[in-house]
Image (tube, helix red, strand yellow):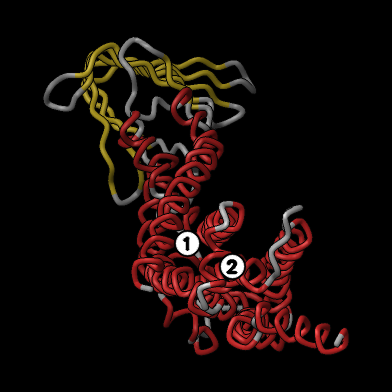
């Protein structure tokens, strides 16, 4: 029996890895399109682009994991039926519950792993991602300007740098500032340096000229300097970014009712997110059991298992869709929260009951004996 479980588990794991990698690659490509503008317009380095997009992977994996496991389990057991392997196992007296041990164990392991991902991996990755995103948008030192190219930032600031030096300074710097509608400022300098202070991003100009044009009265002024410092914030945002729900720890979310700084809608959103960090990972187990239960308890049909396949897919869609709907409703009305637990526990109990107490071969033999008795 251990050999059969290992045989089924190996196929499920291989299928899950292939499906997960394929879905992750497609979603990574779609999500990475958000940062193409940063690469093309702000000169974002490739390594920083790869780092930001890779930090999205834990969140995407957590969403895709239950569906990928459902597809893998469903495919493996359907192939076992087509190849008559499952029929031989059942004819040898192996019960549906024993045949379901492989997806049961994989579902439990993957659920526990996703609990770790949701409560530790995603908060850490989300915090690092938001910090990088905020720094790229609000900190000039993070926007690496390319030599010999004009780089336009979001607030109307255009920067041109002739050459980067080894000590971190730049030579041949030109800055056009049109952040104010009625004022245009142009700065040119032989050398410069980009750095960050507590008040924001600043540029230090050395040996240059500052030209200013007032568009209201067309007044022109010019100033030659040896050293000049100007503050430029590309995002115009606050120095400190706000903490998102995904960045918070599990205990902060569960105890959100004690946080006086949160409004009632924010408090409910935090509480629901805390409970979802425990519930959603166990959808791996629920969907794995749904995928194998129908195929294990149904009678073999040479024409295929079309009805069972349709029922299992519909059940999967209902469980996932109901989970999303109840999560949204619980964010408005907290008394929907127990229904989220019911949506996870009830399908699992039904699958376990069917696997333990519903034996198609037993009912088939009983019906056959009754028919023989009737004929006699």
Q: Quadrant of residue 114?
A: bottom left
Write the residue at 60% across / 58% down. 81
User: Where residue 10 appears, x then y in whole percent?
Assistant: 38, 57
Write the residue at 70% across / 82% down. 365
For residue 83, side relative to residue 198 (left or right): right
User: Where residue 165 appears, x then y in whole percent?
Assistant: 16, 19
User: Where residue 76 appears, x then y in whole percent?
Assistant: 53, 56
Residue reaching furthest to the left: 167
For residue 362, side relative to residue 76 (left or right): right
Q: Quadrant of the N terminus?
A: bottom left
- Alpha carbons under labels 2 and 1: distance apart: 44 Å
Question: Looking at the image, can residue 322 be seen?
Answer: yes
In front of the other: label 2 or label 1? Answer: 2
Write the residue at 34% across / 15% down. 188
Q: Which mark is residue 211?
A: none
Q: Secondary structure at mark 2?
A: helix
Q: Nearer the viewer, residue 203 or 218?
A: 203
User: Where residue 57 appears, x then y in whole percent?
Assistant: 43, 50
Q: Secondary structure at mark 1?
A: loop
The residue labelled by disc 1 is 242
Q: Which mark is residue 292?
A: 2
């Amino acid at each position: 029996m251990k050999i059969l479980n290992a045989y089924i588990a190996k196929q499920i794991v291989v299928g899950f890895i292939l499906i997960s990698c394929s879905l992750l690659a497609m979603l990574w490509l779609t999500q990475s399109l958000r940062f193409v503008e940063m690469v093309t317009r702000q000169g974002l380095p490739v390594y920083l682009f790869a780092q930001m997009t890779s930090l999205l992977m834990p969140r995407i994996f957590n969403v895709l994991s239950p569906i990928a496991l459902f597809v893998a389990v469903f495919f493996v057991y359907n192939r076992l039926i087509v190849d008559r392997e499952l029929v031989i196992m059942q004819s040898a007296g192996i019960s549906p519950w024993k045949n379901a041990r492989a997806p049961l164990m994989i579902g439990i392991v993957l659920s526990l792993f996703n609990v770790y991902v949701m409560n530790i991996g995603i908060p850490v990755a989300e915090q690092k991602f938001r910090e990088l995103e905020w720094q790229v948008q609000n900190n000039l030192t993070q926007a690496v300007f390319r030599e010999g190219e004009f780089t336009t930032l979001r607030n109307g600031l255009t920067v041109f740098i002739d050459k980067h030096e080894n000590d971190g300074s730049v030579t041949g710097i030109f800055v056009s500032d049109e952040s104010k509608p009625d004022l245009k400022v142009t700065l040119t300098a032989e050398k410069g340096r980009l750095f960050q202070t507590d008040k924001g991003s600043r540029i230090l100009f050395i040996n240059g000229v500052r030209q200013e044009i007032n568009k209201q009265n067309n007044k022109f002024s010019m100033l030659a300097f040896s050293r000049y410092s100007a503050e430029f914030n590309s995002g115009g945002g606050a120095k400190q970014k706000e903490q998102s729900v995904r960045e918070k720890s599990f205990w902060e979310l569960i105890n959100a009712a004690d946080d006086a700084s949160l409004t009632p809608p924010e408090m409910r959103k935090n509480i629901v997110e805390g409970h979802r960090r425990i519930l959603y990972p166990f959808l791996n187990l629920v969907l794995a059991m749904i995928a194998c239960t129908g195929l294990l308890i149904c009678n073999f049909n040479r024409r295929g298992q079309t009805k069972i396949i349709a029922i299992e897919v519909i059940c999967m869609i209902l469980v996932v869709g109901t989970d999303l709907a109840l999560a949204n409703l619980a964010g408005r009305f907290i008394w929907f929260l127990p229904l989220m637990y019911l949506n996870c526990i009830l399908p699992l109990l039904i699958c376990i009951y069917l696997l333990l107490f519903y034996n198609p071969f037993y009912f088939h033999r009983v019906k056959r004996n009754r028919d023989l008795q009737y004929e006699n």
